[in-house]
């Protein structure tokens, strides 16, 4: 791809006018992985959480009404579709746009849980994602101001994108992909809907993997 | 390439058995025979298998298949001289499967294992440092180019020792009974694998055997270079025994300490890579 020894061979390109998405061995792998988890989010039914009764050996199973998880499922599918866009985009602006969409849908997945603690967490993540958007688009704007284009096709191998812009982009992706923030907190133990919660993790890691490829390429 | 997968699985399982044996002998125990993990896998393959009523289906089963698929892909990447970036991707995707395993069952132990798995995402950062360092030194991320580079300039183990240490820590973080194995600590039963038993567990054992084989082989290829198959296996065995020594002598760290230590190591490596980049 771009004759750079980074991500393996080019498989095919998908043109939408002057927007040219590309599928290398690397981006296709990420694309297929995201597709598999979108299918899982569509067809899988949520798990029934078991919990231990405090101070005893007893275990009880929580009853989860699938109707309550409908919004979470919708958001997980939307998040998966945004991830598909982000992993194959051949343009920095589109990548940032899809990444911001991933951040928004991730908040939606968390906010869909009918629990005030989890909802409070969603509010906190919303602030993190909002701040991260500034860095994300700031990075893209810096790259545009310096190079005059945001097309990865044009920028590949030139090394023209300043280090500061790359750092902004990475910071932005870290903020939008909020899996580490969410999973390491206690709310995860309260939130049902494993296939949808997992989509947060899938999208976060895939955009992180994609931004690494982008910063090495440009 | 496909015909090599089966031997790789058996060698990986044998390595797991040797790992347990070495740890046991260091700790003054007789330990299990070295083929114990192969027997375990065969035993699980024929045990009664069912799916918990609380599990998220089909994710509970799908995630096992994904585990096997990604490490089969990683095997292909390493031995076809593919991109190191793809190997990094597989390693990250493995984190998703670890997380999914724990979440899909509905078990609180599985869920805690899954949470710890994500918390220990710091173990992936040294791998990124390895990739960045190798790119700075060799100018390529294709494993075939890196082995060619070593044929001309000598092993990277000597030229870029700190980068080798980073990958060594990555492999250590994925070893059973290691200081960073917080996802399978005994206080959470079997962690994220608690509710996967029978043929599902056998599938996971196969995936993890492939994972061990691929990571050890990747280390040898990246830092020593291409070797004849018997020397390659010998180098992998020596590497494994050294890891077993570390695991035998080091207690399991607390989740906080495990993440903190990996982050500090990555910070040191980042400084080293910046130094390499600046000095050309």
Image (cartoon, rainbow, N blue to C red):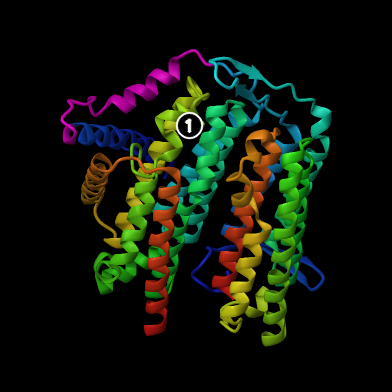
- Asked which secondary structure carries label 1, the reply is helix
Q: Residue at 21% of width from left, 51% of height from top?
A: B231
The residue that label 1 is drawn on is B191
Q: In the rendered image, which quarter is residue A189 located in?
A: top right
Q: Which residue lies furthest to the top in this view?
A: B48
A97 or B37: nearer the eye? A97
Q: In this view, does A121 lie above or below B143?
A: above
Residue at left offset 34%, top offset 65% = B163
Task: Note whether residue B106 is visible.
Answer: yes
Q: Quadrant of residue B266?
A: bottom left
Residue at image point 45% right, 44% down: B255
Task: Give whichever of B43, B53 is nearer the camera.
Answer: B53
Left of B237 or right of it: where is B272?
A: right
The image shows residue A203, relative to residue B186, as above or below, that is below
Determine if the magenta segment contains residue B44: yes
Q: How many labels does the image show?
A: 1
Q: Please provide percent x and percent y for residue A9.
A: 55, 63
Instruction: Give me the residue at 42% from left, 47% from top.
Output: B75
Q: Decide if residue B67 is on the left or right side of residue A83.
A: left
Picture quarter with the N terminus of chain B: top left
* Stretch in magenta: B25-49
- Residue B268: in magenta span: no
- Chain letter behind tag 1: B
């Amino acid at each position: 791809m771009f004759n750079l020894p980074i991500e393996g061979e080019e498989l095919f390109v998908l043109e939408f006018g002057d927007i040219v998405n590309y599928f290398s061995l690397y981006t296709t792998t990420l694309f297929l992985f995201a597709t598999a988890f979108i299918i899982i989010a569509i067809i899988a039914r949520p798990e029934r959480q078991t919990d231990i009764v405090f101070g005893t050996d007893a275990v009880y199973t929580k009853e989860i009404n699938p109707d309550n998880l409908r919004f979470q499922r919708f958001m997980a599918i939307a998040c998966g579709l945004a991830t598909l866009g982000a992993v194959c985009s051949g343009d920095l602006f589109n990548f940032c746009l899809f990444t911001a969409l991933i951040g928004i849908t991730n908040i939606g997945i968390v906010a869909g849980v009918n629990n005030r603690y989890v909802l409070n967490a969603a509010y906190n993540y919303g602030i993190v994602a909002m701040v991260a958007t500034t860095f994300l688009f700031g990075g893209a704007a810096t790259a545009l101001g310096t190079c005059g284009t945001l097309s990865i096709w044009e920028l590949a191998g030139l090394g023209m994108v300043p280090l500061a812009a790359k750092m902004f982009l990475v910071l932005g992706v870290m903020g939008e992909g909020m899996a580490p923030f969410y999973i390491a907190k206690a709310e995860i133990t309260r939130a049902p809907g494993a296939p949808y919660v997992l989509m947060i993790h899938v999208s976060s890691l895939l955009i992180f993997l994609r931004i690494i490829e982008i910063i090495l390429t440009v | 390439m496909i015909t090599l997968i089966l031997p790789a699985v058996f060698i990986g399982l044998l390595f797991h058995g040797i790992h347990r044996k070495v740890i046991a002998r260091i700790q003054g125990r007789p330990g299990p025979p070295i083929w114990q993990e192969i027997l375990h896998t065969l035993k699980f393959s024929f045990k009664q298998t069912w799916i918990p009523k609380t599990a998220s289906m089909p994710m509970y089963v799908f995630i096992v298949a994904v585990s096997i698929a990604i490490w089969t892909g990683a095997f292909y990447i390493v031995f076809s001289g593919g991109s190191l970036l793809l190997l990094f991707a597989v390693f990250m995707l493995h984190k998703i499967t670890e997380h999914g395993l724990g979440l899909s069952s509905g078990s609180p132990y599985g869920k805690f294992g899954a949470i710890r798995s994500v918390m220990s995402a710091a173990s992936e950062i040294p791998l990124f440092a390895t990739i960045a360092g190798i790119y700075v030194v060799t100018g390529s991320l294709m494993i075939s180019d890196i082995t060619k580079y070593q044929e001309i300039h000598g092993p990277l183990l000597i030229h870029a020792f700190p980068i080798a240490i980073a990958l060594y820590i990555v492999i250590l973080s994925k070893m059973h009974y290691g200081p960073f194995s917080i996802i399978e600590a005994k206080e959470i039963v079997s962690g994220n694998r608690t509710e996967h038993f029978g043929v599902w567990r056998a599938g996971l054992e196969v995936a993890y055997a492939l994972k061990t084989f691929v990571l050890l082989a990747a280390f040898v290829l990246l830092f020593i270079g291409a070797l004849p198959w018997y020397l390659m296996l010998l180098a992998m065995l020596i590497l494994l025994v050294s890891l077993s020594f570390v695991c035998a002598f080091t207690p399991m760290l607390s989740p906080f300490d495990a993440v903190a230590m990996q982050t500090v190591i990555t910070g040191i490596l980042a400084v080293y890579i910046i130094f390499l980049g600046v000095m050309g």
